[in-house]
Amino acid sequence: MNLISKIPKEFYKLFASKYMDYYQQFLVAIYEESARSYSLLGLTERECRAVMNERIAKETLEWSEEQFDEEGELLTRANMASVCLKNLENWGWLIRDYDESLNSYVVSFPEYSQLFVQLFQRLYSEDNTRERESVLAVYSYLYTYSSDKEKNNEILKSALQTSRSLLQMLANMQEGMRGYFDELSRQRSFLGIQEVLVKEINNSDSKKYAILTTTDSFYRYKEAVKELIDRNLSENEMRRQELLEREIDEEDVLQCRKRDRAVRLCEEAMDIIYLIEREFDAIERRYNKLIEQKTVFASRAAARIRYILMEGSVSEDQTVTLVNILNKSDRQEEILQKLADRMHLTERFRVMTERSLFRRRDTEKEEFRPQAVRRDEEAGEELDAFVIKPLYTRQEIDAFRKKNEQDGRFRVTEDTVQSMEDLEKLFFVWQEATEIADDRRDISVGRELESRDGYRFSELTIREE
């Protein structure tokens, strides 16, 4: 009878619950606490509720409104642990049994529930980069079997299972890498490519790949695994031949049965080793293909960056568009000079090429010559006019101006400024109006006003003729 037939029908109510995350975390917390408990009989219901209350205290559940569970029972901070524990027992996730020595009910996990809880534990765990599926584990199983005097075939079965898990892990890595190929091809900016590369570096598959290439050292243990496979095959074949050639009394039924059983174990071991060899050949092909995919992914990322640098559009990257215009324009020096004047550069611009990297200077360093400090009257005026602007968009400033306009005239009253943001927007409107002298614009500043919130500002009227 398989485990799935033992699962009750109410078992899957947990996944339909709006408190599914809490139920999963409660199960993981009880499962881990039962392993750390000093009691060998298991956790009591009281201890389970204490563990669940600790987890509730760490979560941020909103209790200001009434909360009802799927069974229609009102949940509060005081009774949530009791209600959830009762639901987990009724749904079949936990089994309660009365223990006479403790004089209370003890909670345990059925076998099918343990599989799900272990999965929840891995999903909620942040440190899941060190996988059991590794080449080193296969090597350890084969070496243990080779050194084992009893030649237990269960060791080989564990090696086979680990090999299949490792092969599946490599296949999953390939599928994940294929997804990053599609995501990379859709990016149209440097920032998008950077985000894809960062996600690919930090995902769990890349960390497992790093373990395979460093700690696990695939290529170093690969040859050792193949040697152990050949050694175990030859040793089993020699042991099988010795058993068949051994002279025993054919009338001794017990001796015949022992010999036949030993021969069957040798044949079974050889079949398992052949399966391990086949799985390991597939692992090697997958691993080589994964390395190839990693190389292709890096080359595609570099090609995508070059494409954006050379073929960028106006809507995607204005900097790339400017570079393309400058490369095709005959007035490149004039444009760069005007750009430098408007940006107030402190040093003349230089074109960066492949020869612009650091190299040793052949000329001698110029002698330091101190100069007298000259007072610049214009610099003081520029510093007074310099104001750090907050992050307001043009649309926000225009919307503020239209809100206070009537018949094409912008007028400031006591109700104009309601917050500090409005006061800053008013300052930017005044600054933009006075920066450019225009005879068609009439600007007048009146008396000082004060809003109901205590903000003080001058009366301002801007009229366009």
Image: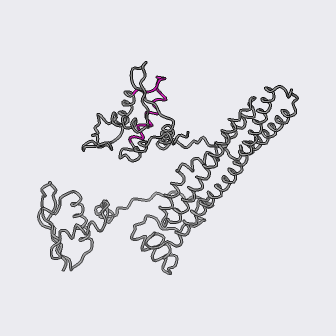
Q: Position of residue 95 (x, y in %)?
A: 44, 32
Q: Nearer the viewer, residue 379 or 376?
A: 379
Q: Position of residue 441 (x, y in %)?
A: 20, 77
Q: Quadrant of the N terminus?
A: top right
Q: In the figure, residue 450 lies in which quadrant?
A: bottom left
Tell me if 379 is positioned left or right of 196 in this view: left
Q: Nearer the viewer, residue 61 or 85?
A: 85
Q: Residue furthest front?
A: 251
Q: Where is residue 429 in the image (x, y as percent from the top left)?
A: 23, 67
Taking the magenta stretch, the answer to whether it contains residue 32 is yes
Q: Can residue 317 be seen in this view?
A: no
Tell me if 30 is positioned left or right of 161 in this view: left
- Colour scheme in use: one colour
In the figure, 207 relative to 191: above or below? above
Q: What is the magenta segment's predominant secondary structure?
A: helix
Taking the magenta stretch, the answer to whether it contains residue 56 is no
Q: Residue furthest top?
A: 101
Residues in magenta, as a range = 22-44
